[in-house]
Amino acid sequence: MHGQQTADPAHAAPPPMRALARARTLLLLLCAAGVTSLNADWPQFLGPTRNGIVPGPSPVAWANPGPTTLWKADVGRGFSGPVVAAGRVLLHHRRGNDEVLEAFDSSSGKSVWRATQPTSYEDDFGFDDGPRGTPSVTGESVYTFGAEGRITCTALADGALRWTRALGKELGADKGFFGFACSPLVVSNRVILQVGGRDGAGIVALDAATGATTWKATSDEAGYASPVAVEADGALRIVALNRAGVRVVDLRDGKVLAALPFRSRQNASVNAATPLASPDGVFVTASYDTGAAWLRWRGEGTLAEGWKHADALAAHISTPVRRGTLLFGFHGRQEQGAELRCIRVSDGSIAWSSPRLGIGSVLVQGERLWVLVETGEIILAEANDAGWKELARAQVLGTGVRAAPALDAGVLYARDKSKLVAVRVAPAR
């Protein structure tokens, strides 16, 4: 979306027409943000609406012999998840000393093109030295943010470089414990990133067409969560969870509208789960004895605490999903085992906990949950508060699955340490 026109106050439309014009403008902004989308693709982290909701009716359990693997492809290192756009599956991964954005044909798995950028990133803990953030596709461009803080804009059609900036280095940002992990948010011709840079460059907005800096906000460390856009209090807001807590920022100029503390008391900790922001409030969660909080909008983009519980749902890595009045997410540290929990938005009370599944990613489609666990199994389960009810389970990947999956038109696209797979798990819409 390029340059929304605003009316001259001296020639403003009558109130009903002004409201209609404003509603249309807001709808366009929301579509650009991924807050609402009619696109059947999976163009960004957590899907079309950036909240883990899969479009379409409730899926049904598959018959024997189970889901069909359509194709597999060898891939390099990283925790970046796949995205789907215009008949292509895009993955940001590392081979040798290059971060590679690779486009695969979604029907065959054949590599269509590769775009590379050099990297010298080293993981201090020896876990993985590949990209962490998931690409974002908007229009004809793909945006990636690498582990050492390089933002790149690439042409979707052929992988041609449009622009790139070594943003982490430019802004003097610390890589933290595990490198830069933000998945770019593209909204209203701006790319929003949590960088954690110095001199007020904690959150940065870049011009999507040129990469030029539009605004900078906060002096907070970045953490590992990604920003989201939400319509609240009659305007589009940017919500971010960094190392210090929750920040609400004005999309237009970067003005910080709300700042609430939310972090572990331990220095050696992470805030990795992306906020779930909606018109009625914001849900945040973190592990390391932190727990969860529900924050309510109270006007002009400000927030007030609704409830906070240390043991409601403490997500270590992945982002929970919301279905109506319920929240579903993984509770517990990865190295200690984790369980899937259902809690209530109203008060944070626990409706049920699953057996220990290990960590994983969870999506919601209609009245069902898709759960991809670190052992490489995909589980279909009920999405209600009556208790954990597993409907089907199948092995689709090897072990060590950390990246968020994509699910488009009944096909699951997911990766482990060395393979990217396309698996038919439900009929096409």
Image: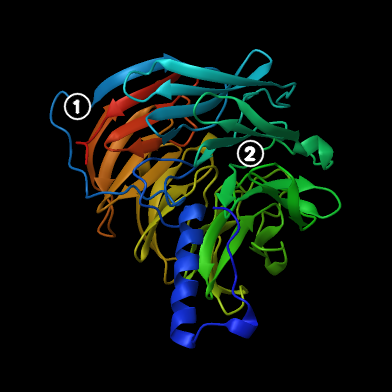
Count of labels shown?
2
Q: Which mark is residue 66?
A: 1
| x, y percent for residue 34 | 47, 52
Q: Is residue 340 left or right of residue 366?
A: right
Amino acid under disc 1:
Gly
Q: Secondary structure at mark 1?
A: loop
Residue at (19% x, 36% y) in the render: 427
Corner quadrant of residue 308: bottom right
* Residue situated furthest left in the rendering: 63
Location of residue 136 in the rendering, given as x and y in whole percent from the top left corner: 53, 40
Can see residue 116? yes
Residue 429 horizontal side relative to residue 261, left or right: left
Which quadrant holds the C terminus? top left
Which one is in front in this view, the residue at disc 2 or the one at disc 1?
Answer: 2
Tell me if I can see residue 284 in this picture.
Answer: no
Q: Residues within 10 Å of mark 1 (few under 14, many from 20)?
A: some
Secondary structure beneath disc 2?
Answer: loop
Front in this rendered view, residue 282 or 15 = 15
> Quick check: 404 left or right of 393?
right
Question: Could you say where residue 62 lies in the image, as x and y percent from the top left?
Answer: 17, 34
Colour scheme of this structure image?
rainbow
Q: Amino acid at mark 2?
A: Ala
Residue behind mark 2? 181
Residue 260 percent coordinates (x, y): 67, 67
Query: Which numbered disc, 2 or 1, marks the residue that appears first in the sequence?
Result: 1
